[in-house]
Image (cartoon, rainbow, N blue to C red):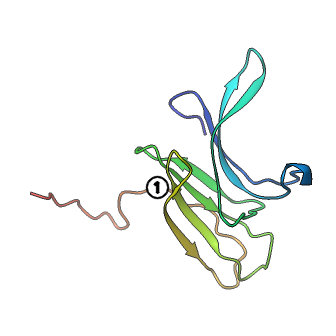
Amino acid sequence: MPLSNGNVLLFDNGNFRPQAEGGQYSRALELELDFDSMTATKIWEYRHKPSTFAVCSSVTHRLENGNTLLNFGFSAEEACCRPFYIVEADSNGEVVWEVEHRSPGKPTQYRVYPSDDIWGEARISDE
């Protein structure tokens, strides 16, 4: 996903990551791309603790407040019982909030999207 600063935000599932680089784990990654030198520079990352490997069906979004929303989707582990993590992380890679979600009998938690409401609730002034 391109960001307003020109960087790219992506969910790196970690498929086929060599053991020498830590093996299979998933993370959110912000990269600055330099097309002149054909290089990518890591600007930011979030890696779940403990390390989680989500082989596919994951997503990340940069929120208006600068934080990042992530969903660690498809489980490469137990088909029915591994928790799915939905996380909001700040610019330092620290967890703001986290939900551990289980869907018995389901290996996939496909996507999450940022939203200001659940069923169209109206905001009430603090006045």
Q: The N terminus appears in which quarter of the rendering?
A: top right
Name above or below for residue 12 compared with residue 126. Answer: above
Please give left or right for residue 18 compared with residue 91 in the image. right
Q: Check disc 1 and report its element: helix, strand or loop.
A: loop
Q: Residues within 10 Å of mark 1 (few under 14, many from 20)?
A: few
Name above or below for residue 99 compared with residue 39. Answer: below
Q: The C terminus appears in which quarter of the rendering?
A: bottom left
Please give left or right for residue 51 compared with residue 68 in the image. right
Residue visible at 74% across and 14% down in the picture: 36
Q: How many numbered discs sit on the rendered protein?
A: 1
Disc 1 marks which amino acid? Answer: Pro
Question: Which quadrant would residue 42 be assigned to in this image?
Answer: top right
Residue 113, horizontal then vertical, whole percent: 51, 57
Farthest left residue in view: 127
Q: Which residue is mark 1?
A: 114
Farthest bottom residue in view: 104
Residue visible at 36% across and 57% down in the picture: 116
78 or 107, which is in the foreground? 78
Residue 102, horizontal then vertical, whole percent: 61, 79
Residue visible at 59% across and 34% down in the picture: 2
Name above or below for residue 101 compared with residue 39. Answer: below
Farthest top residue in view: 36
Please give left or right for residue 67 compared with residue 24 in the image. left
Residue 90, horizontal then vertical, whole percent: 49, 50
Residue visible at 41% across and 44% down in the picture: 64
Residue 37, horizontal then vertical, whole percent: 77, 17
Please give left or right for residue 22 compared with residue 118 in the image. right
109 or 37, which is in the foreground? 37
